[in-house]
Every structure is written in structure tokens, then in C-alpha cells.
Image (cartoon, grey):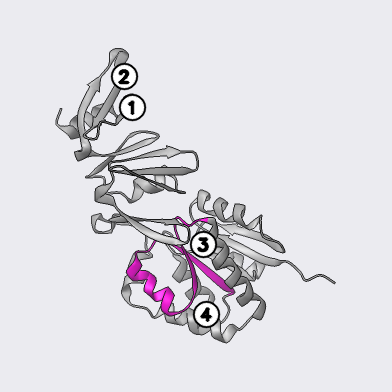
Amino acid sequence: MSERPLRVLVVDDEPLGRQRIEDLLRHERGVEVVGTAGNGIAAVEAIRSLHPDLVFLDVQMPRMNGLDVVRAIGADEMPATIFVTAHNEHALEAFELAALDYLVKPFDDERFEQSFRRARRHALVKDSSDLRKRLLAVLEAPSTIQESSAAPADASQHLERIAVESRGKVRFVQVGDIDYVVADGPYVELYAGERRHVVRQSMQSIEDRLDPAKFMRVHRSAIVRLDAIDVLHKGAGGDYEIQLKSGTRLRVSRSRREELERRLGG
């Protein structure tokens, strides 16, 4: 008689984030995604009603973040958990010290599989006392992780760097080095000087976390650092383009033209 499938719950406030994990889980044998949740409140209800074996739990969610979910359920009752986070490397120390599985957004397929394999083994063993100790270690971690788990609320919490994961390694791109960002389907491309970095996030999620005093969305598919702009080209028919100091040219949508001119002092 075959074993029952591993029951998995996916929690992330971004639809693309949930879809990314679901897509990767489809390639794993013996896995059933029993539900998804887009916020912490729904996550608590789903954990209590669905009794999953494993939860992918986004740390950064508005109102009720991932750590609040653990508190609401209780460390004793939490299933095996993989935290999904955009924390900086200092906050990640709390997860590392507790030996809990975590994924840094954006993560690649190799890193996902590595974390999933460990979590699957943990879920099968069902060592609740060990999991409880690990979860409590994270909950009792320094305030760095508690503060950064909240949604950005003021200028002090805008992104200073973006984690880019490739081949199992996480590198950090300084936001101040980014000249512009463009959309490419479910991905965004970050251009910093001559370097190009691809991350699986939505344009909206990137825009929400960048400092609006320094960056502006000039088109539905382009965000630019304002001090990287060199020339504003006014074309025939009302079409506008910006030329960056690097020589790159980007279209400006008509609805954003006036605001851009104002911000550039034109």
C-alpha cells in the first residue's frame, strides 16, 4: 500500500509568489497542495482546518506576518515549515541559528529542491519537540527579524538591496546601483551598470519597496532611477523617451509624462 501524499499549504500575499511555489511542487512526487492563502489570517484558518504536513510561509505580509501566524497557531501545533523571506543577511541569522529551512526571494529551482527535501524528511519524522524548539528560537530572535517582517511603512524601510539567488548562492544588488528595472513576463530585470539580474517578482512588488523619492515608474513595464536620467526626448505625436547616462533609452507613457517632467524640474 502506497504512502499518502505529503499535504502542503502555500502562504504568500503575492499571487506570483504562490504560483511560483505551486509550479515547483508539481514536479515533486507524492505531493498534494491542499490549499493556498494570501494573508496571515487566512493562513491560520487553513492550518487549523486543513492540517497540512508542510507549510511554505511568507514572512513579510501586511497586518499579520508569518511570525504572527506561528504565534497564533502555537509552536507546538505548527506543521513543518519553510519560511519564505526577503530578509537581509543579518535577519537571516535567526533562521540559520535555529536550523530552520528558509528560502530567500527570489530563489532558483536548485535552492527550492534542497530546502524541500530537508523539510519533507522533517515532516515524515514528525519530531514536534524538535520543531517547537526551532520555532521558539526564531520567535525569540533579536528585533531585526521582527521589524523586517512587517510591510514597509516609511522611508527607513525602503529596500537598500535586493537578494538575487542563482545556483544556490544569494547575492545582494545594491539598490543605489540600479539604473532601471523592466518587466519580462513573470520576471523583472534589474540593470545595474553593465550587469543584468533576473528575479521572479512583479513590477508592483518592486515598485512598492523602492524609495519613491529616487525611483519612478515611467511606463507599465519600466521603473527608472531618477538621477540616472540624462535627457528627456519629446517625439512627434506626443511620444516621449528618456535617455539614461548609460545611453539606454526607455519609453515614457503619456499618463506619466507630466509627473516625470515635474520631478525632473522641466
SS of the residue under disc 3: helix
- Residue 169 percent across, percent down from the top left: 43, 61
Amino acid type at mark 2: Asp
91 or 46: nearer the viewer: 91
Q: Which residue is mark 4?
A: 75
Residue indicated by mark 3: 111
Q: Residue at the far right: name it.
A: 1
Question: Could you say where residue 217 lies in the image, as x and y percent from the top left?
Answer: 32, 37
Q: Judge whether residue 97 is colored magenta.
A: yes
Q: Nearer the viewer, residue 55 or 106?
A: 106
Query: Secondary structure beneath disc 4?
Result: loop
Query: In the image, is 76 to the left or to the right of 263?
Result: right
Region rendered in magenta: 79-108
Query: Which callout, 4 or 3, points at the residue further toward the start of the chain?
Result: 4
Give the total number of marks visible in the rendering: 4
- Residue 251 marker: 1
**Quick one: label 3 or label 1, which is nearer the N terminus?**
3
On the image, numbered disc 2 is attached to which residue? Answer: 239
